[in-house]
Amino acid sequence: MNGYMGKLLFVDLTEGKLWEEELTEEMAKDFVGGYGLGAKILFERMKPGVDPLGPDNILGLVTGPATGTGAFFGGRYMAVCKSPVTGGWNDANSGGYFGPELRKAGFDGVFFLGASEKPVYLWINDGEYELRDASELWGLDVKETWEKLKELTGQEKVRAAVIGPAGENLSLFAAVMNDGHRAAGRGGAGAVMGSKKLKAVACYGTQKVEVGDRAALNAVNKFIIDRMRDPECPTHTTSRGFAAAGTNFGTTASAMSGDSPVMNWAGNSPEHFPEEMAHAFDPERFEDKYNTGAYGCAFCPLRCGASYKIEDGRWPLEETERPEYETMSAFGSNCLCTDIEAICKCNEICNRGGFDTITAGSVMAWVMECYEKGILTKEDLDGIEAPWGDGAAMVALMEKMMADEGCGKKLKLGQVGAADAFGKGHECLAVAGGIEPGMHDARLPGKFALIRAFQYDPTPGRHVKGRGFYDNVNFDEEAGKADVAGAANTDMTNSAGLCSFINLSAPGFSLPDMLGAIWGRPYTREDLIKDGTRIFMVRHAFGLREGRLRDKAYISPRLKGEPAITAGGNKDVVLNNEAMGDAFFKALGCDVATGIPSREALEALGGLDAVIDCFYGK
């Protein structure tokens, strides 16, 4: 099949058995790849109610049809599993080079069942594969693990998806890491990998992905690069900014506008994080000082990453990575911290440990709010004082989590888990569906629909999940349909193995044209919306089957404006999140009260027999 290797690898870690299965044309056509394919396989092969950190959870690492084809921005893969954080569906997205290398090694995805009694890693070498002892790897950090794998496999060009101490110690915000710093970060996939005693998936290959119409794909790539280079293009400045300073190029503006959360989502930028503090994140203040060179993911024309070196100060770093916007905001405005070097140190701890930086920074903000209010004391925090903005406190607490000692054993569980472990602080939670949301505030005009994604996406709290537009006043049928179309488009982008920055960089880009070129067949916008909605529906059905009905989709009141922000760009905004949910579920063809899809809606999408059987019987 064009766009696929045509093979999936399955590994039973309990029995030590490995086998290949065909990726059929029907599966590829209906569920595309990435988390679409992952959701189909997990829904059909996992029983409901399994322990997310038990052997019956299935972990998948899955590529998409664009991954490794040469399609611009086509360097991504997805980690899929049942989330130990939310108890529902989980997918986490990562770039770098692991996804393309997995395909070059011969497979579209690999799925892990059961759990090993001792640490192991999977080695895939150009179509050959074996489980190997990982005793030499267990206990190493992410970067050390990758270097050791080069030695153990004898292959300097090996790429690997690994866990660090966070995953080994079952932190609920442990990430699956690759390339030393790229993270499938959200929802605790790294903890699932650790619970299986699976330290790494290492791969190397020389195979190629066949493309249906290379000339057409080259034409799409040319369109993208032309738009990025065109000074008249509305996103030309964005593309240049990302290339020059990464996702952090707009951090100052986001903090000042109200886009970035402040004080654990309870404060506002003019009063609590004023302009002079926000300007600490101006790239010109530190970029030339620390930047030692740019890098990018596979097949990326944007190259938004950079290596840093901090030669002196309290936390010198010989070689590290520039923090992303989400990291800067989570440890920055959300904690009232302007100490860039402290944030870089926290970022390095997260990368080496394998922690999701969004939740890590959000935990720091929760600690600081609880400390300010006297809920958590110095004694609770092993003698560490944690006032707002204290970069040294953030570093010390991250080191506690990295070492899995003292208060770090509680903090590694995320905001909700930490509040439960301490037995206090629940009134300070800022979560959606049990997980800390991405660093973009839905209360900012123009972003209101983000609250629907935060609350009702099958993976709650994600800032990169698709949505339409709501003006917080009208919630008519057309608004609901636009919301469904936005969700479908994003699910197709992710399932295809593409980075979402493709839409930021090249307005007018046609995903149907790119997929049609890869597959070598006509593909329309209508096809894409139907396929993306099917993928959304199976992800949604997974959560429903686990008990995540609509009334269980809790969101902290402060995220929607209760109490309302008193100053700044989000002033007095109170979001009508329930009306947005009503419009979305009605347009999706679901019962508005429960979120359960109608039989007619499922049958109209096709390919969802297992979901129909689950809710309506055979």
Image (cartoon, rainbow, N blue to C red):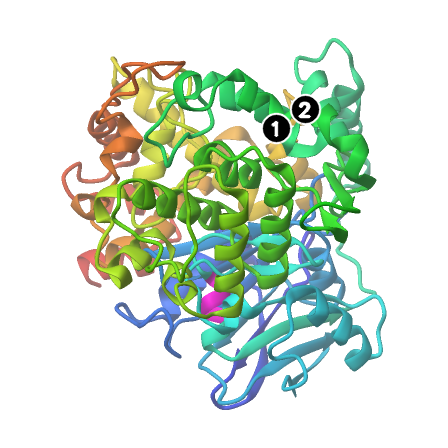
The answer to whether residue 33 shows anywhere in this view is no
Spot occupied by residue 200 in the image (x, y as percentages of width and height): 63, 73
Q: Residue at x 36, y 45 (%)?
A: 366
Q: Residue furthest left?
A: 593
State the image quarter where residue 296 is shown: top right
Quarter of the rendering occupied by the C terminus? bottom left
- Front residue (pair 409, 464): 409
Give the residue pinned by disc 2.
506
Marks 1,2: beta carbons within 8 A: yes
The dominant secondary structure in magenta is: helix
Is residue 192 within the magenta segment?
yes
Work out whether residue 188 can be spotted: yes
Q: Amino acid at mark 1?
A: Asn
Q: Which mark is residue 503?
A: 1
The amino acid type of the residue labelled 2 equals Ala
Q: Nearer the viewer, residue 80 or 508?
A: 80
Q: Is residue 479 above or below residue 97?
A: above
The answer to whether 434 is drawn above or below residue 354 in the figure is above
Magenta residues? 189-193
| Residue occupying the point 68% across, 24% down | 506
Instruction: Specify whether 533 is left or right of 560.
Output: right
Could you say where residue 295 lies in the image, as x and y percent from the top left?
Answer: 79, 43
| Count of numbered tags | 2
Q: Is 53 placed above or below 397 here?
A: below
Quadrant in the picture for residue 293: top right
Q: Secondary structure at mark 1?
A: helix
Tell whether position 82 is magenta: no
